[in-house]
Image (tube, rainbow, N blue to C red):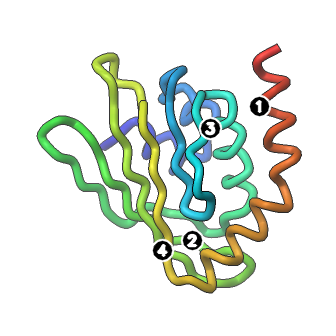
């Protein structure tokens, strides 16, 4: 089983963050521009841990290069959401590209609202971690 998945499923956010490369790029399902760097990606993951309820992975797909697609289910404000974490790794086994897609639209909108409400805190956490 994928180390990132194991960390998330055990609720160990810091172990999940440890799987990120310093130059990771996070591609949000609700924002147009990607977020480059481990500090902002880690802060986003910490916020997502707070927003999602009953989060669990339901499927793991790996290609021969070692990249993974992790299909998940959760709730956001009581709405069922299904999504997929697409993970690309570098030679050291760290995540360098982290793209998330979610559905349905109503749940994606709820996710966008919840994350938007936390975004100033997310940015402040990312900045503080680089000092």
Q: Are marks 1 and 4 in contact (CB under 8 Å)?
A: no
Report the disc number at residue 126. 1
Q: Which of marks 1 and 4 is in front?
A: 1
The earlier-in-sequence mark between 1 and 4 is 4
Which residue bears the numbered disc 4? 82
In the image, residue 39 above or below residue 1: above
Residue at image location 29% in from the left, 56% down from the top: 60
Q: Where is residue 7 in the image (x, y as percent from the top left)?
A: 51, 40
Provide residue 110's location: percent of width, then percent of height: 71, 76
| Disc 2 packing (10 Å; few <14; some 14–19; many ≥20) | some
Instruction: List the single residue furthest toward the left.
Output: 64
Above or below residue 53? Residue 38 is: above
Q: In this view, does 56 lie to the left or right of 123?
A: left
How many other residues sit within 10 Å of disc 1, few (<14), some (14-19) or many (≥20)?
Answer: some
Left or right position of 117 against 88: right
Q: Earlier in the sequence, mark 4 or mark 2?
A: 2
Q: Residues within 10 Å of mark 4 (few under 14, many from 20)?
A: many
């Amino acid at each position: 089983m994928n180390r990132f998945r194991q960390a998330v499923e055990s609720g160990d956010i810091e172990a999940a963050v440890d799987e990120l490369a310093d130059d990771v790029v996070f591609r949000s399902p609700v924002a147009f521009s990607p977020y480059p760097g481990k500090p902002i990606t880690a802060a986003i993951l910490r916020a997502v841990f707070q927003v999602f309820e009953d989060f669990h992975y339901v499927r793991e797909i790996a290609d021969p290069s070692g990249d993974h697609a992790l299909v998940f289910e959760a709730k956001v404000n009581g709405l069922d959401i299904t999504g997929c974490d697409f993970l690309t790794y570098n030679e050291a086994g760290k995540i360098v590209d982290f793209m998330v897609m979610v559905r349905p639209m109503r749940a994606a909108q709820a996710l966008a609202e919840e994350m938007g409400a936390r975004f100033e805190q997310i940015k402040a956490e990312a900045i503080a971690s680089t000092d």
